[in-house]
Structures are given as structure tokens and as C-alpha cells.
Amino acid sequence: MRSQIEGLANLIGHSYSNFNIEIKPFFKNLPVQLIPAIDFVYNNIKEIKIKKKTILISCGKKSVKASILLKKKYKNLIFNIHIQDPKTQHNQFDLIICPEHDGLNKSNSISTLLALHNIKYNNVPKLENTINFIIGGSNKYFGFNIETQEKILEEIKFLSKSYKINVIPSRRTPTRFLKKLQIIKSDNIIPYNSLFNPKIYGDLLSEAEAHIVTWDSISMISEAIFSESSTFVYPFENRNCPTRYQKFYKSIIDKNLAKFYSRNLTAFDVSLSDYNIKLKTKILNKIESHLWFKSNAS
């Protein structure tokens, strides 16, 4: 969520301040519709003092009602933007930026095909025969069982005969998988065990000529595509893959931004030169259309 917030802030502005809102334990597991927009819900919301016109960006369930509360408190000093569908009180936001596959169609919403992010890419030549294998894990929609893990390890071994493989895990990647990866003897397999630094991650994404990304994370797939290297989506068993994920896969493949994985990693051209420009223009136009709010806000 922070990556998406920072990605949007970098897209439309030059500087920003992060604030991690702390919701009280009692309210954490409530549906967002039942969380009241009052000071009592949060431990630290009173620390936020807004004295000039400010763009307020929020993302995630715990910040939905915080944004609404601050908007009511500071009124026209705030232009509040929420990333993802807040699932409640849509009219309490000046702008909602929501994934295209969620199908939200409101007068105050803009849809995006790819997920926002804070990754910085380098304009460097691609390293031939270098691939990133970006691996997620289980979540409420996808399993990541032992059989899947063994299949991925076999693919990494097979590819390492022809390519240098940077293996990039996520926080959800099982420890068992990482331990088994460590014992594979190959100079062409390079595991990155703790890769949560956007700069290092951006460097790897910028340099590789191709990426293979497990299909459980729309964010990871989007980040790979943004590098403009060939991106291959690796499918595996799923518990209950939602329709919105299926729509996302179809969109990126139809637009030739990615392909499903096969061992024949034929490179293809990807260009996103206009994507960020068009998105930034749409957002700034929405902000400018609110005559009460000037574009020189912070």
C-alpha cells in the first residue's frame, strides 16, 4: 500500500510526507462499512495538522475512514484521493484511483490497468541472458503448496542451463522454498533473500531482459511490466481466483504487455512511454476541475 501511495505522490508531485495511521485493535477486523469516521478509532490521527491546501492520499481499509474524517475536519484545505475501491461512501472522496479490473465506474474515479508503485527504473542496457524469477506465495485466493514449489524449483534449474537467474522472493514466499533454493549448486542461480529496497529491486528490474512472475500478485506483475522488459506470468494452482484477476491477465495479454510462461522465452517489445503521461494528465485534470482547490497544493 505504501508503494502505491508513494508511486502516486511521485507521479503528480515533487515531495511528500508519509504518515502511518494507527487504528485501534478493536476496529481492525471490522468491515470498513462499520468503522466510524471519528477520532476515537485511531491512536494518532490528532497528530495530523493541516494548515494549507494539501493533497491527501490514502490506500487500504484502515485509512478509508481516516481520510473521510480529515476531509470533514479540514474541508476545502484537503483534496482527498483514495487508491483502490474504498467500498463505502464513494462520494466522500474527491478522487478514487481504482484498478480497471475492479469495474468501479464513478464520476469521481479513474481506472488504471497496472498497479501504482514506487519503484525507480534505470535507463540502462538490458543484460543478455539474464532473467528475474519473481516469486510470491499463498494468499486467500491462491495456494502455494509443496508441489507448486517443487515445480518452480525445477523450472529455475532448467532455465539456469541457459540463463543467469535472479530469484526474487516476496514476504509471502515460504521459508522452506528459500532453504531448498539455497542448496541448489549453480553459479547461474542468484537468490535474493531480503529484497524490500525499492532501489535494489528497481535495478534488478531495469537490467534483466525478461521477468517471470508468479500470478498471485497483480502488483509484482505490474512492476515487472513497467520495466519494459518481456514479462511472463507463471500460473499455478488457485483456491478461488477471482474474476477481477482473470480480467487483469486477459487485459495485459491482449495488450501485449505480458504473456503466460512457457519454456520458450521469446522476447517481445513493450512500450509504456505514454502510460504514465496519460495517467498523470487525467489525475491533474481532475484536481484542476475542482475550482475550490488550486494546483499548487502540497
Image (tube, rainbow, N blue to C red):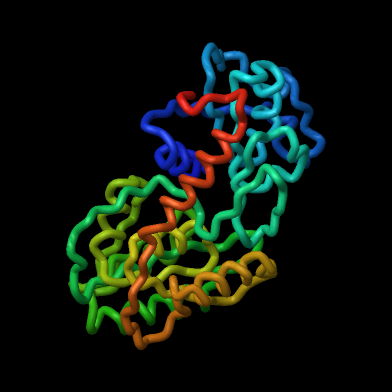
Vertical comparison of 267 with 124: above or below: below
- The percent coordinates of residue 224 (x first, y second) are 39, 62
Q: Residue at x 39, y 59 (%)?
A: 226
Vertical comparison of 5 with 112: above or below: above
The answer to which quarter of the image holds residue 27 is: top right
Q: Residue furthest right?
A: 34
Camera-side residue: 143 or 70? 70
The answer to which quarter of the image holds residue 77 is: top right
Q: Residue furthest bottom?
A: 264
Q: Residue at x 40, y 64 (%)?
A: 225
Residue 90 visible in this rendered orientation of the protein: yes
Tell me if 194 is positioned left or right of 2 in this view: left
- The percent coordinates of residue 139 (x first, y second) are 60, 60
Camera-side residue: 223 or 163? 223
- The percent coordinates of residue 150 (x first, y second) are 45, 77
- The percent coordinates of residue 174 (x first, y second) are 47, 61
Q: Residue at x 24, y 53 (%)?
A: 122
Q: Residue at x 50, y 39 (%)?
A: 284
Residue 44 visible in this rendered orientation of the protein: no
Camera-side residue: 22 or 150? 22
The answer to which quarter of the image holds residue 16 is: top left
Q: How many marks?
A: 0
Tell me if 166 is positioned left or right of 74 in this view: left
Vertical comparison of 156 with 7: above or below: below
